[in-house]
Image (spheres, rainbow, N blue to C red):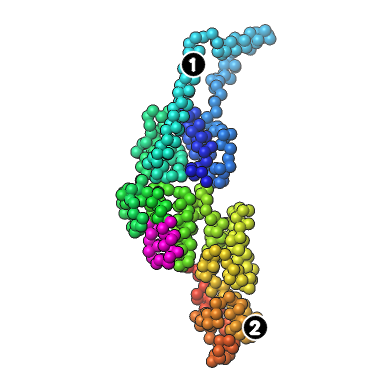
């Protein structure tokens, strides 16, 4: 990905449009400009649109209005001959023709072209100065190295107060604030810093700059591999996320931080933090910032299956691209969806055992529900079931795990309760009533902590 989140052709096109605006058409042109970019962003076409060929209708030259032309035509006596009509047409044409020998008109035309040339020269000069500042590490680029906040001047055209316009800038609008001037640039050099909820405006001395945040991310990855406590690593990751947010940094590092925190939260069953990370990653991916999109797409499908949110799941799956559907994690999640929809519990538990990446951690949250449902089906079909058969079919870790599952769900109707686990047999007729009651009490309603 380039150093800027937004495509360069879009920036050049915006600069061109702003340069063509006048006091007469500025309001209409800015509104149309905002709408065109918003439509492209919604359609995810910011990078694929040929911006050089896009033309704003409000910037097209307006045809010369004919004032009361119809009334004049009615009032004027009609010519009685072709010669009179031809004479009248020649007079009107000669009156509207520009006199090439008029020195005053030539001077005005030369001054107009000179002004346009000067505006273009100032724009090129500002562009060169901006590039020089980026090499020297200017404050604005330090705050947001990826330049992810293009078009603040456009999106906030109607916002009052705190104007950052340059009066010498031919494109400047005094009604548009320059938010980049107020972006905080951190000065704190501490590698690790505890998370504190902000209750006032953040101060630069309390925020770490981008270069330090990169080092912090690398150090936290190493600490987690060395098996540090989750409470500490979660606190540090939340502090890192906060420093990125207050400095308006949205780039590859931001995605890496949220992805890392999301995986760690899944591993430790912290669904509150995971759902926060998943929601943030969805927005970052929509901005076009690269990351493990397919992996977290699969996680989102599994989370929707956990919540049994069928309407949102169908909508989300319908919006997947062919590239996403071809990815192995997404295909696995879609197979899980199909197994659940048709009640194929045998395929479901095989997919549970073979889940890629961190998908198994999400399935852990609803696999007991599906085990109870599968056991209800099995009890309808069989008179007795051995504990070993239940262990094999429902993908338990051990015979003891299977026995504990039955005890938790109130199923204790073994025909030989005093035998070893390898010999125990379940009485399906009595077990069906017990497991059905437990299912209604435990799984009829889904509660997801931290769901967003």
Q: Quadrant of residue 345?
A: bottom right
Q: How many marks?
A: 2
For image coordinates 59% across by 60% down, the residue present is 330
For image coordinates 48% across by 50% down, the residue present is 252
The residue pinned by badge 2 equals 382
User: Compared with residue 443, is residue 38 higher up or lower down, i.e. above or below?
Assistant: above
Q: Which residues are magenta?
A: 218-239
Identify which residue, 405 or 9, lies in the foreground: 9
**Disc with the residue nearer the chain's start (1 vs 2):** 1
The residue pinned by badge 1 equals 110
Q: Are marks 1 and 2 in contact (CB under 8 Å)?
A: no
Identify which residue, 127 or 363, lies in the foreground: 127
Rounded to the nearest angstrom, the CA distance separating label 1 from label 2 is 97 Å
User: Compared with residue 375, is residue 446 higher up or lower down, i.e. above or below?
Assistant: above
Counting from the top left corner in percent of width and height, residue 86 is at 65, 10
> Could one spot residue 444 in this view of the protein?
no
Farthest right residue in view: 82
Counting from the top left corner in percent of width and height, residue 2 is at 51, 43
Q: Is residue 228 magenta?
A: yes
- Using a 10 Å C-alpha cutoff, classify the residue at mark 1 as few (fewer than 14 neighbours), some (14 to 19) or many (20 or more): few
Q: Is residue 352 magenta?
A: no
Label number found at residue 241? none
Q: SS at mark 2?
A: loop
Counting from the top left corner in percent of width and height, residue 1 is at 52, 46
Task: Give the side of residue 1 with respect to residue 143, left or right.
Answer: right
For image coordinates 63% across by 57% down, the residue present is 326
Counting from the top left corner in percent of width and height, residue 166 is at 38, 31
């Amino acid at each position: 990905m380039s150093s800027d989140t937004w495509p360069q052709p879009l920036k050049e096109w915006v600069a061109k449009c702003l340069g063509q605006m006048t006091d007469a058409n500025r309001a209409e042109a800015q509104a149309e400009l905002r709408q065109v970019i918003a439509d492209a962003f919604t359609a995810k076409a910011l990078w694929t649109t040929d911006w050089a060929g896009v033309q704003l209708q409000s910037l097209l030259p307006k045809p010369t209005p004919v004032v009361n032309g119809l009334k004049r035509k009615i009032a004027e006596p009609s010519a009685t001959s072709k010669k009179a009509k031809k004479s009248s047409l020649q007079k009107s044409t000669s009156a509207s023709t520009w006199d090439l020998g008029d020195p005053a008109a030539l001077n005005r035309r030369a001054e107009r072209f000179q002004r346009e040339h000067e505006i273009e020269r100032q724009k090129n000069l500002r562009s060169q100065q901006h590039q020089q500042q980026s090499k020297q590490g200017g404050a604005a680029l330090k705050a947001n190295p990826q330049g992810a906040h293009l078009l603040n001047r456009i999106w906030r055209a109607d916002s009052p107060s705190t104007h950052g316009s340059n009066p010498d800038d031919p494109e400047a609008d005094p009604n548009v604030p320059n938010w980049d001037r107020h972006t905080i640039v951190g000065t704190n050099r501490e590698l690790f810093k505890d998370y504190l909820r902000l209750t006032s405006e953040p101060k630069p001395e309390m925020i770490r700059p981008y270069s330090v945040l990169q080092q912090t991310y690398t150090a936290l990855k190493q600490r987690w591999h060395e098996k540090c406590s989750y409470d500490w690593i979660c606190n540090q990751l939340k502090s890192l996320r906060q420093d990125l947010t207050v400095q308006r940094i949205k780039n590859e590092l931001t995605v890496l931080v949220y992805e890392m925190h999301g995986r760690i939260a899944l591993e430790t069953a912290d669904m509150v933090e995971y759902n926060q990370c998943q929601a943030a990653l969805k927005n970052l991916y929509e901005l076009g910032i690269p990351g493990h999109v397919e992996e977290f797409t699969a996680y989102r499908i599994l989370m929707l299956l956990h919540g049994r949110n069928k309407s949102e799941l169908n909508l989300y799956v319908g919006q997947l691209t062919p590239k996403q559907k071809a990815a192995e994690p997404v295909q696995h999640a879609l197979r899980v969806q199909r197994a659940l929809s048709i009640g194929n519990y045998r395929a479901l538990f095989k997919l549970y055992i073979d889940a890629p990446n961190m998908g198994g951690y999400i399935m852990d949250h609803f696999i007991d529900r599906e085990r109870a449902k599968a056991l209800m089906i099995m009890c309808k079909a069989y008179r007795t079931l051995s504990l070993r058969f239940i262990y094999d079919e429902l993908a338990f870790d051990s015979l003891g795990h299977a026995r504990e599952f039955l005890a938790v769900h109130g199923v204790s109707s073994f025909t030989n309760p005093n035998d070893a686990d390898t010999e125990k047999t379940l009485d399906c007729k009595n077990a069906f009533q017990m497991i059905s009651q437990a299912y209604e009490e435990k799984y009829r309603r889904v509660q997801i902590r931290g769901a967003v």
